[in-house]
Image: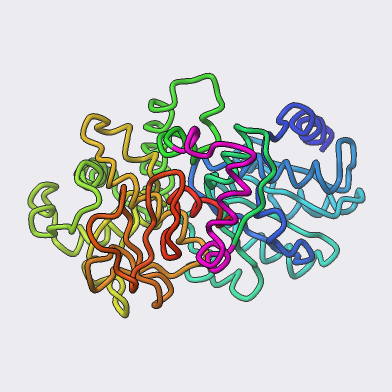
Amino acid sequence: METFFKTHNYLLEHDVPLVRRGLMDEINWDDRLIGIKGTRGVGKTTFLLDYAREFFGVGNKSCLYINLNHFYFTERTLIDFADEFRSKGGSVLLIDQVFKYPDWSKELRYCYDHFQDLKIVFSGSSVMRLKEENPDLSGKVVSYNLRGLSFREYLNLMAGSNFQPYTLDQIRENQKEITKEITQVVKPMAHFQDYLHHGFYPFFLEKRNFSENLLKTMNMTLEVDVFYLKQMEQSYLPKLRKLLYLLAVSAPCTPNVSQLSKEIQTSRATVMNYIKYLADARLVNMLYPEGEEFPKKPSKVYMYNSNLLYPIRPSTVKAQSVRETFFYNQLQKDHKINAATNNAQFLVDGIYNFKVEEHVKGKINPLYTYAIDKAEVDEPNMIPLWLLGFLY
């Protein structure tokens, strides 16, 4: 136990956060079983440590971070460890890499039922379906999704600012005033292209080649998260990788399922299942008309965030693809995004038709809201595209 406390304190002292994540204030920390899901690279481990640092501090033995990937847990059960921890005064156990541990959901349920003086916060892959696929935790766990950095969080980090998020209604109604407040402090467009290229994943701060690191993260997501949690056969992994490549080089695209099935030599149904796996892994987004959903074919497939467009074939990345991908990614956290039924690209919350463009082409349509990729816009139904990165 002391070894784990030493590691815990070392991490709190050395893994110092550079930006405070907004999710910290969205979670109800009074719940006794909390799951933090997210794709690889978005900072789940750092988030757990940030919570320990902010709410408990270094040296406080009532809170402990552990990684279930540790060899120690090959011979010691999580239940026994949690029981010993609470017997020594522990009250909050932070568990990383939970899905690597056999029967993790059953043991978490046991701890929930029998150790009512213990709170457990655990992290896991975005591929996990905590409630649908784990009946042991149904009605017990409260899950949250930790996303990559928003443009607001990235800007605060790079410019040393402290901007707070806005709602979509606030932005739509007061974009001119909000834009002025922000641009008086910092020039967002000076940072926007960098964010689109590498700002979503916090590991851009590491002294490694970002593209190579992101490719490694994408492969690890397929080879570990999807492969392990979806219980795929090893022989099918190259097909999944090729499908991701084909989608990435043409995204956003309307998938030709018949052609894709020929390309990766599998059935149409398997292609659709694989696209769903990629969406669960936060590697792609599927855009549907209002009222439709999987297993129907999506209207379009987007990469999950704009950073993912660059590592595979950077020479083919189109600016318009980047704009639309950014829009979808930043709005999907709190809004329902569907394919529009007219010349707009997106229908938001079943109400707003959004056109995402570099600049307005032709006459302005008052039925649309325009997300324009430039620093300042003056029309009431126009919004600077970068400002939609302030939604979280």
Q: Residue at x 68, y 48 (%)?
A: 95
In the displayed structure, 147 sits above or below 69; it is below
Name the chief secondary structure element in magenta.
helix
Number of numbered discs on residues: 0
Based on the displayed image, in which of its 4 quarters is residue 371 positioned?
bottom left
Q: Is residue 182 magenta?
A: yes
Percent coordinates x, y for residue 8 in the rendering: 77, 35
Percent coordinates x, y for residue 296 in the rendering: 23, 72
In the displayed structure, 339 sits above or below 90; it is below
Based on the displayed image, in which of its 4 quarters is residue 338 positioned?
bottom left
Position of 325 compared to 75: left or right?
left
Position of 283 compared to 49: left or right?
left
Q: Is residue 102 visible?
A: no
Q: Residue at x 58, y 39 (%)?
A: 155
- Magenta region: 167-192
Q: Residue at x 31, y 73 (%)?
A: 293
Percent coordinates x, y for residue 197 in the rendering: 40, 34
Which of these two is toward me, 275 or 189?
189
Q: Residue at x 63, y 76 (%)?
A: 139
